């Protein structure tokens, strides 16, 4: 059974992408980071491999999606609080990202989202399961 998740994303400018995510507070594992790829650490079991598009294309026979024109995936991460969701989205926008939807408050779950400079969509959610209806 798998114990780790590695999400692979194509990026146009690796340095720009690394600066964006570093600005959001993410770190990179230097063991798996070079001029073609960067290993962004989400947690001790979740990693995002930012791969230059030309390098990414060596792993697939399909065309590489342009995430600014079509949705390839929604990457959802949990947050510790509503404030953390708001702060991360605001910081992402200040670093060159964009929002693509309004925040949603479902009572027990608060979510908002941003697109990184390459157009990959990131969903952030704070969930309070004690407020889940029908508990």
Image (tube, grey):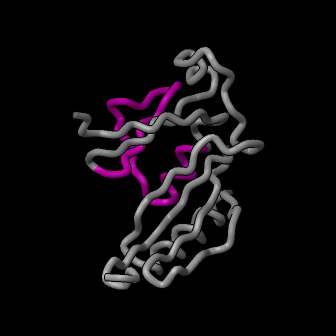
Residue nearest the observer in this picture, 16 or 98: 98
Position of 127 with respect to 64 (left or right) is: left
Residue 102, position as x, y percentages in the image = 67, 73
Above or below, comparing residue 19 to residue 131 in the picture: above
The quadrant the N terminus occupies is: top left
Position of 98 with respect to 126 (left or right) is: right
Q: How many marks do you count on the picture?
A: 0
Q: Which residues are magenta?
A: 17-43
Which residue occupies 58% across, 36% down? Answer: 14
Above or below, comparing residue 10 to residue 23 in the picture: above
Residue nearest the observer in this picture, 33 or 124: 124
Residue 103: in magenta span: no
Q: Quadrant of residue 71?
A: top right
Which residue occupies 62% across, 47% down? Answer: 120
Which residue occupies 66% across, 57% down? Answer: 97
Which residue occupies 63% across, 27% down? Answer: 53
Residue 36, position as x, y percentages in the image = 52, 25
Residue nearest the observer in this picture, 65 or 130: 130
Residue 37: in magenta span: yes
Residue 49, position as x, y percentages in the image = 46, 35
Above or below, comparing residue 55 to residue 22 in the picture: above
Position of 122 with respect to 115 (left or right) is: left
């Amino acid at each position: 059974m798998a114990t780790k998740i590695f999400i692979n994303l194509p990026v146009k400018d690796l340095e720009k992408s690394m600066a964006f995510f570093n600005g959001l507070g993410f770190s990179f594992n230097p063991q798996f980071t070079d001029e073609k790829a960067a290993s962004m650490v989400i947690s001790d079991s979740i990693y995002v491999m930012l791969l230059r598009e030309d390098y990414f294309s060596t792993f697939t026979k399909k065309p590489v999606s342009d995430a600014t024109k079509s949705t390839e995936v929604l990457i959802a991460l949990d947050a510790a609080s509503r404030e953390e969701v708001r702060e991360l989205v605001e910081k992402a926008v200040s670093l060159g990202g964009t929002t693509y939807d309004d925040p949603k408050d479902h009572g027990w779950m608060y979510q908002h989202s941003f697109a990184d400079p390459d157009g990959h969509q990131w969903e952030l959610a704070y969930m309070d399961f004690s407020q889940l209806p029908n508990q």
